[in-house]
Image (cartoon, grey):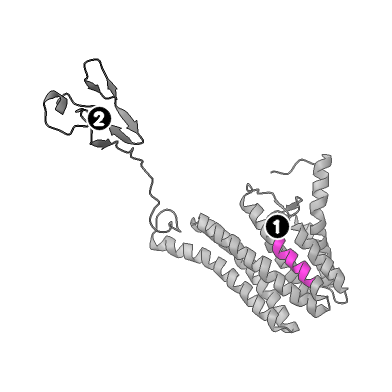
Amino acid sequence: MVIDGDGIALLATTAVGDHTTQPASPLSPAHGHPGMSGPSGLHVPTRTRRAPRPRVDVEEAPAGPIALLPGERTPARRLKFAIANGCTIGSLLLGLVAVFLAMAGGTTNLRLAAASLLACVVLDGCDGGLARKFKVASPFGAQLDSLADLSSFGVATGIVVYQWLAAQGAHPVTAGAVCALIAVCAAIRLARFNVSPSNSNNFWGVPTTMVAAVLALNMMLGPDGVSVYAQVAFVAAYAIAMVTPFPYVKLGRVLRLPLWVWVVPAICAMISVPGTFVAVVGGYLVSGPVLWLLRRRGNRPALAA
């Protein structure tokens, strides 16, 4: 407040926070108008005005969960969507069956558990193909498939292999460590796959489905009389192969090889199925590092990224 030479009060507008004090009106008690006066007879403002707060538009989140099936939701598309994702659920449930059978113990139950894992592989191969064929592929289906793969090919396969190695005479700590490696590497492999660009020519690391299939077939067709620690090393090698940067040719390309290429394996299988199995899966395991070395040395064209 400032008093001029004539004794007239001049009140400057003062802002405190979001409150604004209005200046004195000419129609104050000093000018003969009724009102409140201070000790010196000057007008004392008593009313304040709250400044309006700015309005902020906040985007509201959509109510309820997102739609699982994108696009048109006709009964026919819903049925196709259910069939494709039903294969994924079936793979998940068969993984649980494999765990229950392995925990029951016994040679027969272990073989049935291995067969259940092979059935998981078959269903896992069906869900994506059906979703694309029916044109009902969705982000939900991709996430569900990844979770089911971790359950069946990471956790369930690890438990079944643990029971099998323990039955073969492996130390529980050794068997437990190598089977925990299966679960951990499967989780890393699936997470890396989910954030990697698609590649139509090769895998980076052995897929979890192939590892589960190889280990299940090894329980059913593997040679007898092999040292249990050789089996442990075989399991560990395939578990680590899931997270390697080595390129592995997809099975679709392998199956399109000329017919004469399959003559030698067919003849070998007539002589010894276990021996042929070891040769084929061992050769596929080694093919990744070999292709990687050849690519680095520039002896063949680079594989598609």
Determine if residue 266 is in view: no
Identity of the residue drawn at 82% across and 59% down: 283
Mark sitting on residue 22? 2
Residue at disc 1, secondary structure: helix
Magenta segment: does it hold 181?
Answer: yes
Give the image quarter of residue 175: bottom right
| Pointer 2 local density, CA inside 10 Å: few below 14, some 14–19, many at least 20 | some
Residue 101 x %, y %: 67, 80
Q: Amino acid at mark 1?
A: Leu
Which residue is disc 1 drawn over? 251
Q: Amino acid at mark 2?
A: Gln
Magenta span of residues: 175-185
**Which is more foreground, mark 1 or mark 2?**
2
Identity of the residue drawn at 45% across and 58% down: 69
Outermost residue on the front side: it is 39
Picture layout, residue 215 above or below residue 133: below
